[in-house]
Structures are given as structure tokens and as C-alpha cells.
Amino acid sequence: MDIQQLLKIEEATLADLDEILEIEVRAYPVPWSRDQMMDVFNQKVIRLKLLMDGQLIGYAFVSIILDEGHLLHITVDPIHHGKRLGRYLLEEVLKLGDTHQLATIFLEVREGNTPARALYDRIGFNQVGVRKGYYPCKINGREDAIVMAYTVPSDTFNFQLS
Ligand SMILES: CC(C)(COP(=O)(O)OP(=O)(O)OC[C@H]1O[C@@H](n2cnc3c(N)ncnc32)[C@H](O)[C@@H]1OP(=O)(O)O)[C@@H](O)C(=O)NCCC(=O)NCCS
């Protein structure tokens, strides 16, 4: 069966928090804490979850201010990496550009996060800056964040010129 037929995107709710945290600790060298995650659930953030055959296998969080989106977090369960599921989830995020009439979607990524940077490059994000020492490292020290931006194609907007 085509894997895409098993995939579904739904809104993540607090009921998903334990499952999300379980993936989070396996996916990141420095995972978000429960408190950091709770902030996302307490704020006006778009929370998407990716289901495969009913099982939560990924999530993405996006905040929106005026015409700017900010991809706060995107994660696929490590046991499913390399199956184009990150790309699938990111494409759902990009659709928000259309539905919310965004001009740009921004994100930060660890300088050394090769898989994520390759995914963002591939899908059309461009580097627009660097935040020095933005991320804590697992043992000690800090790592730079690469700031990337995706320009939402203007022809997806439904302008009425007349
Ligand atoms: C980043 C992440 C979401 C990618 O998810 P994924 O499902 O494994 O990635 P996909 O299979 O969809 O790959 C999409 C593209 O990303 C790139 N890519 C993915 N994994 C890669 C790797 N290990 N090395 C190099 N490029 C990689 C490729 O360009 C790939 O496209 P291609 O298959 O056409 O060559 C996933 O690695 C993840 O959850 N990582 C841990 C959490 C994280 O770091 N999130 C990002 C925070 S900024």
C-alpha cells in the first residue's frame, strides 16, 4: 500500500502531550522540557500532528504574527526518518502560508543539524541570518542557529485587483 494513504494531519491537543514528549526525547540531543512544550499548548500556536495508520509519528508547531509565520518545531519519530515524512509534514506547514495569507515563514535550525538543513534547502528555504550561540549543547557550550526564510509565492494569494 502507498504510505501516503496511511498518513493524516490533525490538530495536536494536550491529550497528545505524553506521546509527543516520548518522541521528543529520542529525536533531539537537547529536547524541549515538558514546561517548554506546555508553553506551546498554552499559547496561540498552530499545532499539527502527523499520524500514520492512526499512530502519532510527528508534529510541527507554527506561530503566526500578522503576515509572518514562525516554524517553532518540526519533528518526525526517529524510527521513521528518511521516508519523506518530514517533507510531507513541512509541506503541510507551507500550506498555512496560503490559508493564512502569509508573506514569509521563518525558522531557526542548529548549524550542525544536517538532515533538517538539507530538508529546508530542498523545500525552498533560504538562509537569512545567524544567531550566535542560540542553542545550548548537550554537554557544554553553545551552537549557532541558522535563520532561514521561505517566501510564500504571491500567486497563491487570491488578490482582487478590480
Ligand atoms: C529533520 C527531520 C524532520 C527530517 O525528517 P525525515 O522524515 O527524516 O526527512 P525526509 O525523509 O522527509 O527527507 C526530506 C529531505 O531532507 C533531506 N534529508 C533528510 N534526512 C537527511 C540526512 N540524514 N542527511 C542528508 N539529508 C537529509 C533530504 O534532502 C531529503 O530529501 P530527498 O529524500 O529527496 O533527498 C527529521 O530528521 C527529524 O525529526 N529530526 C529530529 C528533529 C529535528 O532536528 N527537527 C528540526 C529542528 S530545526
Image (tube, rainbow, N blue to C red):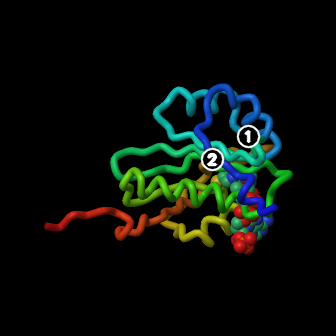
Three-letter amino acid code at the position of disc 2: Ile
What residue sits right under mark 1 in the picture? 31
Q: Quadrant of ligand 1?
A: bottom right
Q: In this view, does 46 lie to the left or right of 104?
A: right
Q: In this view, does 160 lie above or below 27?
A: below
Q: Assign a secondary structure to mark 2.
A: strand
The residue drawn where x is 57% and y is 55% is 92
- Comparing 111 with 97, the one in front is 97
Quarter holding the C terminus is bottom left
The residue drawn where x is 36% and y is 55% is 101
How many residues crowd around disc 1 within 10 Å: few (fewer than 14), some, or many (20 or more)?
some
Q: In this view, does 108 lie to the left or right of 24?
A: left
How many residues crowd around disc 2 within 10 Å: few (fewer than 14), some, or many (20 or more)?
some
Query: Dividing the picture into quarters, in which one does residue 19 lie?
Result: top right
In this rendering, the label closer to the viewer, 2 or 1: 2
Three-letter amino acid code at the position of disc 1: Pro
Q: Is residue 160 left or right of residue 34?
A: left
- Comparing 71 with 85, the one in front is 85
Query: Dividing the picture into quarters, in which one does residue 97 lie?
Result: bottom left
| Distance from the alpha carbon under mark 2 to that under mark 1 | 23 Å
Q: Position of residue 39 (x, y in %)?
A: 56, 29
Q: Position of residue 56 (x, y in %)?
A: 74, 41
What residue sits right under mark 2 in the picture? 9
